[in-house]
Amino acid sequence: MIPRYKRKEISKIWEPENKFNIWLKIELLICEALSNRGDIPKDSFKTIKKNARFDIDRIDVIEKDVKHDVIAFLTNIGENIGHDSRFVHMGVTSSDIIDTAFSIQLKQSCSILKRELKRLLNNLKEKSLNFKNIACIGRSHGIFAEPTTFGLKMLGKYCEFERHYKRLCDAEKQISICSISGAVGTYANIDPSIESFVAKKLRLKTEDVSTQIIPRDRHAFFFTALAMIASSIENLAIEFRHLHRSEVREVEEFFSKDQKGSSAMPHKKNPVLSENLTGIARVIRASCIPFMENISLWHERDISHSSVERTLGPDTIILCDFALSRMNNIVENLVVDKKMMFYNLEKTNGLFNSQRVMLKLIEKNISRESAYKIVQKIALKAWKENKSFKKLLEKNNEVKSLLNVREINELFDLKYFLKNINAIYKKVLG
């Protein structure tokens, strides 16, 4: 991943040093379990544990000759251990180490992703409470609809990301798997108790049937969860991008003192962070297909999945972490313009009351079709000529024959639309 879109903490998980440290830890745990069973002399295990270390540059040199990363790693630690290195990697195969290590890296990444999701949930909850009763116009198809509150918008997003948090926790369980079952997964040369020992030490579950590798439906589930998170990040980003538009101006991304919006137009304050997240979401979603295709492998194993996991795996996770962090910064520093929200409500000329008027007319014992037709004609006139919807209703003979002025005035109370906001909040937040 290019430096522009990576953060240090999660990137370190996917660097060679962390990977080889995990490989070494797994190999040492296997040796410890074998030593406990008496399959490795106690003194030999002590020597292995004391001298086992690796050098990344040396591994790279060896791999150029052997064309196999695990063999290069084993050769390097064997050089440091000496004669007792013959007991290392005994009865296991490369996938046992690679797949179990991949599980640990995914789990380590999950810890950071969950933390950022929790942060986002807290930020959205805070915004939803702060703006709970700040009315704004709701939109469907991008067109004025009926009033809502900005807080309720944020509460809906809170619920959406809360579902994602639960999905990510489920995905973490799916990929927290240890598989040490040897060639084609039959435990022919390694006792199942070794796998159980290592899994317990690493706080992983054991695979039911590994076929030498961990089945890739687990990983597809995990990366699909990330893609869904990215899609919801984009959904929220698009909301902010629209509300940031010059014609709307209800919210803005924070614009720092020395920030520049355009190389050509000094007046510009562009929603570049939200736009960036839309692009990142596209990349993360695109990773779903290769991980789903990784499920289809030949017989007990092949390595067609490997290149996807070595490239798209880290990049997708690093991008998701970056996107969550960026969205957190946007939400935390969001500029909310209450006056513009009220202004846009007023700009509708009261048209958002059209359904109330129609329903009231229906109460007067006329058909829904007739009521709709009367209200639509007046509403379109109010919109086209930029006139007060209420005043046009008061002047319309058909309406006057059914409703008096007091009844019409009662239909134009903004509080009517917000009367159940507290009930929604109670349902969600208790």
Image: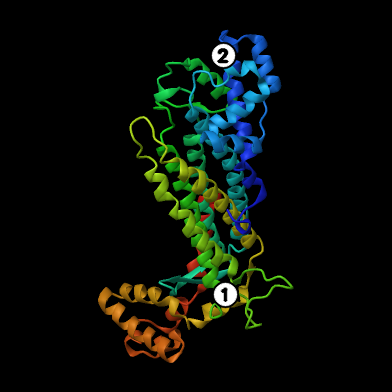
Q: Amino acid at mark 1?
A: Met
Q: Is residue 319 visible?
A: yes
Q: Nearer the viewer, residue 67 or 194?
A: 67
Give the labeled residue for mark 2: 34
The answer to whether 390 is drawn above or below residue 332 in the figure is below
Q: Is 109 left, or right, of 406 in this rendering?
A: right
Spot occupied by residue 22 in the image (x, y as percentages of width and height): 61, 32
Where is residue 376? Give x, y as percent: 34, 82
- Which residue is at 62% across, 47% downward? 11
Q: Which residue occupies the extreme front position in the image?
A: 65
**Disc marking residue 254:** none
Instruction: Name which quarter of the figure residue 40 lies in.
Output: top right
Q: On the image, which quarter does residue 185 sit in?
A: top left
- Residue 430 in sight in this render: no
Q: Residues within 10 Å of mark 1 (few under 14, many from 20)?
A: many
The number of callouts visible is 2
Left or right, residue 356 beside residue 161:
left
Circle 2 SS class? helix
Amino acid type, callout 2: Leu
Q: Are marks 2 and 1 in contact (CB under 8 Å)?
A: no
Image quadrant in which you'd find residue 202: top right
Residue position for label 1: 341
Q: Is residue 218 above or below residue 338?
A: above
- Residue at 68% in and 15% down: 46
Residue 160, position in %: x, y? 49, 53
Foreground residue among 60 and 90? 60
Residue 294 vertical position relative to residue 343 in the rendered view, above or below: above
